Amino acid sequence: MGMGFAQSSGSSAATSFVRPPAPAGCGVVRGGACGRGVPSQFYVLSDRQSAASPDVATGILSVQAINCYAFIDPGSSLSYVTLFIASSFGVEPEQLHESFSVSTRVGDSITATRVYKNCVVM
């Protein structure tokens, strides 16, 4: 199981997203998708899979002035970044109150333990 880091998907977003703390009764147990009825999703796809999938786009995003190759799922409210990329942000992460695990379509999983806030994404 790898380690991942989460980031707010609001106006201060990064490749690794997590929404603000959920109201009581929402969160990890219910997929963190309170009010949406759909749990958040994260997938790792090959180029061939992403080209064939109408639900996922690929592209280069600039996160904290660092170009990052990204798989973008418009239906997801969460995204993740590796420590390798996050260590270049120049932003100190905050520890999540509660870590959570995310599984990929290929059966791998990560545990998100930190959130990066106020990162610039272009």
Image: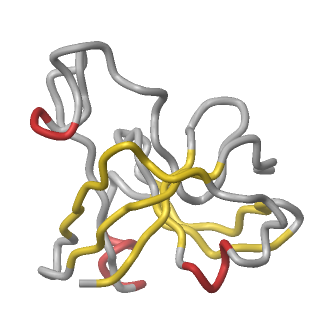
Q: Position of residue 73 (x, y in %)?
A: 41, 51
Q: Based on the displayed image, in which of its 4 quarters is residue 43 positioned?
A: bottom left
Image-based side of 122 in relation to 36, left or right: right
Residue 89: where, in percent of width, then height?
78, 67
Residue at the far right in the pictured view = 65
In the figure, 85 relative to 75: above or below? below
- Count of numbered badges drawn on the protein: 0
Residue at (67, 44) in percent of width and height: 117
Residue placed at 33% from the left, 83% from the top? Answer: 2
Residue beneath the point at 17% across and 31% down: 38
Residue situated in front as seen by the camera: 32 or 39: 32
Q: Quadrant of the N terminus?
A: bottom left
- Quarter holding residue 68: bottom right
In terms of depth relative to the viewer, which is nearer, 53 or 24? 24
Q: Position of residue 82 (x, y in %)?
A: 53, 78
Residue 2 left/right relative to 81: left
Residue 120 rendering spot, x and y as whole percentages: 81, 48
**111 or 63: nearer the viewer:** 111
Residue 31 occupies quadrant: top left
Looking at the image, what colour scheme do you see? secondary structure
Residue at figure coordinates x 48%, y 28% from the top left: 20
In this view, 66 is above or below 57: below
